[in-house]
Image (cartoon, grey):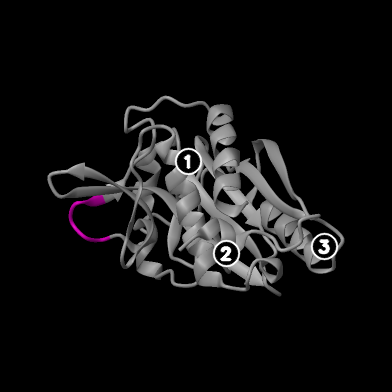
Amino acid sequence: MNMQSNLASQNHASAVEWQTATGLIPYPLAVSTMEQRVAEIRDGAADELVWLVEHPALYTSGTSARLEDLLTPDRFPVYNTGRGGQYTYHGPGQRVAYAMIDLRKRGQDLRAYVRALEAWVIDALGQFNIQGERRDGRVGIWVDRGNGREDKVAAIGVRVRSWITYHGISINLTPNLEHFSGIVPCGIVEDGLGVTSLNDLGVQASMDEFDTVLRNSFRAIFG
């Protein structure tokens, strides 16, 4: 499937705005900001937006989250959210890219959009010689560590309102991986499955360096 041609905007006059937040953005502020922008895009008052943020340490629960997967409920703040998926962790050293994309202009195909998000992450990781891979039945992007071990390096969670997307992707650059131990991340319970980061994989990349690659890879996938 050619994601670039399928999801490229049919309105060539439109633009995708990019913003990079400074500091650690509280999760409720991020959600309210996204919801406001989604409404503006829906009404034709704003362009599509990719918003790059970092959060303080916190857990979020998606629509498929199971209470028993929250192992230490008093460790960090926990936020219920309408995105798909289960429990995930956000914190310093993790790049979160919130994508507010108008699928009315891009084919109204949610499955193709999620595949494009996956392709975006895989392409960006490839620029750092990391082979990110999809896995059937497992959301996110995975790295084969050998000897039957696979670790998740990026999470994906999407919500759609009036065919405008929000939430998006998170990629582990240098987070404290021990913080993931307070949850069953994304419902991962099988032996040999875990969580990793660029730093854990031996790749040293600053947030600015990774942001530049993310932007270029976005263009390659979405046009």
Viewer-nearest of labels 1 and 2? 2
Q: Amino acid at mark 1?
A: Ala
Q: Residue furthest right?
A: 45
Which residue is at 62% across, 51% downward?
223
Which residue is at 37% across, 28% downward?
203
Q: Give the CA distance from mark 1 to mark 3.
A: 29 Å
Residue on which the image places disc 1: 124
Which one is earlier in the sequence, the residue at label 1 or at label 3? 3
Task: Tell me the number on the disc at residue 101.
Answer: none
Q: Is residue 24 above or below residue 77?
A: above
10 Å neighbourhood of mark 1: few (<14), some, or many (≥20)? many
Q: Is residue 129 above or below residue 188?
A: above
Task: Tell me the number on the disc at residue 40.
Answer: 3
Task: Tell me the number on the disc at residue 6.
Answer: 2
Which residue is at 52% across, 59% downward?
3
As for residue 55 lying within the magenta part, the answer is no
Viewer-nearest of labels 2 and 3? 2
Magenta-tinted stretch: 189-193
Q: Amino acid at mark 2?
A: Asn
- Element type where label 3 sits in the image: helix
